[in-house]
């Protein structure tokens, strides 16, 4: 891809309407464009990042055995009347009438629809457990959409649902998701911590929010520093290990403000470990038993007896994560955003000095581009006529993790190569590739 042909509408200055870094940067480098209040188009750069996040989320769902489906955005009101949530959900639900005057809605979440799908197909406990997920747009008519795609009205979410025969099996499913979330956020280079949370309008009795610390977050959190050191890397997908894993986290006091209790906090957390700050909710898991299966009559046959299935639901804010990663990774001191390599829109910018009537550097860049491609390195060639330092500035702004420069000092087989926030090195193309590949594999 040549930069001159890419659709990356960079603004000269930070847009005045944006209050937080992620919103500023996403508008500034043309990742998104607002189309109406709380509704955005995703432009190539932003869309690339979101797709990479989506793919990591997907792989980590598949890895614990959740099956992917795709439910529609538009739902019928009937099932919401069955669960009793049609009235409860209130003004956040976008209600629509079709030409037959039927009440439809744009799904804010999918507990009802997935329960309907389940109950019409699964009849025996022998088909349990079932775990289904989809990645789909949601609409919530937020009272005050703000901070760009962090709190918007139309957003992209991964939501999963589990169906089990009893509480014990359902906790096993819940804990699988618990592990899967830890793995997902780790691959996104985020330290998201699980916090005991209120269940809100979804209802139920067991719930964790996954939160990353950031001053600009909207959740108030109270936690114990030591929770960041819990190691989840070698956990097996097996009942006891998963129970142990959750216990290791739950050992440490860690809650959002709805569950906060000053006395408990002070009693359970020694002063030097207390963290009282703000965070961004990037995921939320719930266990709610038969809250939906009972009113909606989703039951299986268990040795001749009818059992309502026990359900949980599990969300990840895929589009919110794009902004959350910026909030977590932006370095205020150097004023540099460095995208984690796992989700960077491009791994490396190839920056040739362009001289009049001389295409040598473009030809060299093309060769490097092809070589990178053969190594699964995603690159962009800046073929514009800007000078080298303007180009470097531009990629510093966008946050591409690596830069390869073909300039005055390029001689023979050595290139100027740097990590966005690092020192310039003089390397062969093979050495540059192996640095990028090493970062990718970490
Ligand atoms: P919040 O407390 O931030 O309003 P929520 O608790 O209502 O979120 P859930 O129903 O748990 O949200 O949805 C799952 C995930 O979807 C959240 O963890 C969050 O990452 C994302 N999400 C929820 N609402 C929005 C929104 N308005 N804009 C962008 N992402 C959102
Ligand atoms: Mg939530």
Image: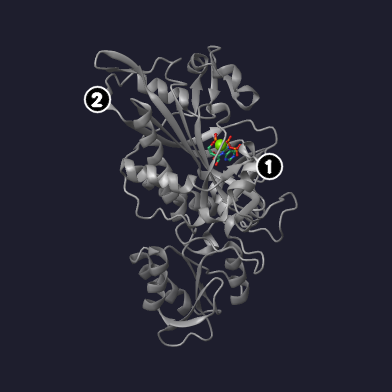
Q: Which residue is situated farthest in the front direction here?
A: 267
Q: Secondary structure at mark 1?
A: loop
Count of labels shown?
Answer: 2
Q: Residues within 10 Å of mark 1 (few under 14, many from 20)?
A: some
Q: How is the image coloured?
A: one colour
Q: Quick check: 39 left or right of 405?
A: right
Specify which label sits upstream in the sequence, 1 or 2.
2
Quarter of the image for the C terminus: give it.
bottom left
Residue 274 position, x and y percent, is 62, 53
* Quadrant in the rendering for residue 196: top right
At x 62%, y 42%, the residue is 264
Mark 2 = which residue?
126
Q: Is residue 340 above or below residue 107?
A: below
Q: Nearer the viewer, residue 356 or 387?
A: 387
Q: Is residue 190 visible in the rendered structure shown here?
A: no
Residue 295 position, x and y percent, is 46, 14
Q: Quick check: 75 left or right of 179?
A: right
Residue 39 position, x and y percent, is 62, 38
Residue 366 position, x and y percent, is 42, 71
Q: Which mark is residue 399?
A: none
At x 39%, y 78%, the residue is 431
Q: Is residue 312 above or below residue 348?
A: above
Q: Secondary structure at mark 2?
A: helix
Quarter of the image where ligand 1 sits: top right
Q: Is residue 78 visible in the rendered structure shown here?
A: yes
Judged by depth in the image, the label closer to the viewer, 1 or 2, is 2
Q: Is residue 408 above or below residue 259?
A: below
Mark 1 = which residue?
146
């Amino acid at each position: 891809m040549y930069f001159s042909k890419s659709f990356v509408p960079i603004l000269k200055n930070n847009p005045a309407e944006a209050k937080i870094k992620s919103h500023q940067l996403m508008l500034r480098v043309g990742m998104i464009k607002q189309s109406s209040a709380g509704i955005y188009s995703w432009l190539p750069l932003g869309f690339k990042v979101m797709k990479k996040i989506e793919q990591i989320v997907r792989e980590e769902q598949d890895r614990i055995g959740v099956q992917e489906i795709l439910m529609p955005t538009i739902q019928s009101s009937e099932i919401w009347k069955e669960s009793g949530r049609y009235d409860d959900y209130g003004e956040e639900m976008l209600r629509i009438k079709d030409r037959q005057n039927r009440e439809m809605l744009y799904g804010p979440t999918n507990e009802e629809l997935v329960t309907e799908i389940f109950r019409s197909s699964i009849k025996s406990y022998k088909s349990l457990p079932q775990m289904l997920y989809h990645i789909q747009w949601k609409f919530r008519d937020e009272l005050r959409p703000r901070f760009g795609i962090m709190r918007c009205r139309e957003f992209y979410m991964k939501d999963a649902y589990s169906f089990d025969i009893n509480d014990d099996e359902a906790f096993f499913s819940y804990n699988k998701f618990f592990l899967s979330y830890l793995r997902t956020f780790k691959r996104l280079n985020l330290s998201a911590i699980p916090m005991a949370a209120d269940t809100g309008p979804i209802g139920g009795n067991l719930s964790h929010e996954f939160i990353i610390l950031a001053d600009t977050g909207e959740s108030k959190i109270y936690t114990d520093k030591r929770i960041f050191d819990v190691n989840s890397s070698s956990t097996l997908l097996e009942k006891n290990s998963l129970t142990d894993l959750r216990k290791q986290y739950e050992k440490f006091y860690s809650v959002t403000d709805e569950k906060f209790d000053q006395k408990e906090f002070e009693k359970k957390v020694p002063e030097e470990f207390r963290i009282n700050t703000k965070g961004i909710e990037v995921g939320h898991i719930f266990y709610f038993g038969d809250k939906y299966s009972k009113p909606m009559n989703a039951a299986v046959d268990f040795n001749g007896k009818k059992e309502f299935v026990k359900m949980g639901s599990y969300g990840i804010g895929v589009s919110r994560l794009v902004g959350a990663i910026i909030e977590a990774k932006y370095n205020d001191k150097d004023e540099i955003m460095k995208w984690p390599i796992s989700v960077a829109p491009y791994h490396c910018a190839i920056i040739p000095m362009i001289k009049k009537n001389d295409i040598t550097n473009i030809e060299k860049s093309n060769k490097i581009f092809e070589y990178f491609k053969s190594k699964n390195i995603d690159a962009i060639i800046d073929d514009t006529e800007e000078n080298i330092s303007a180009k470097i500035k531009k990629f510093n702004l966008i946050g591409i993790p690596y830069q390869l420069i073909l300039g005055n000092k390029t001689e023979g087989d050595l290139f100027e190569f740097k990590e966005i926030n690092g020192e310039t090195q003089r390397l062969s193309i093979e050495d540059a590739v192996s640095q990028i590949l090493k970062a990718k594999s970490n």
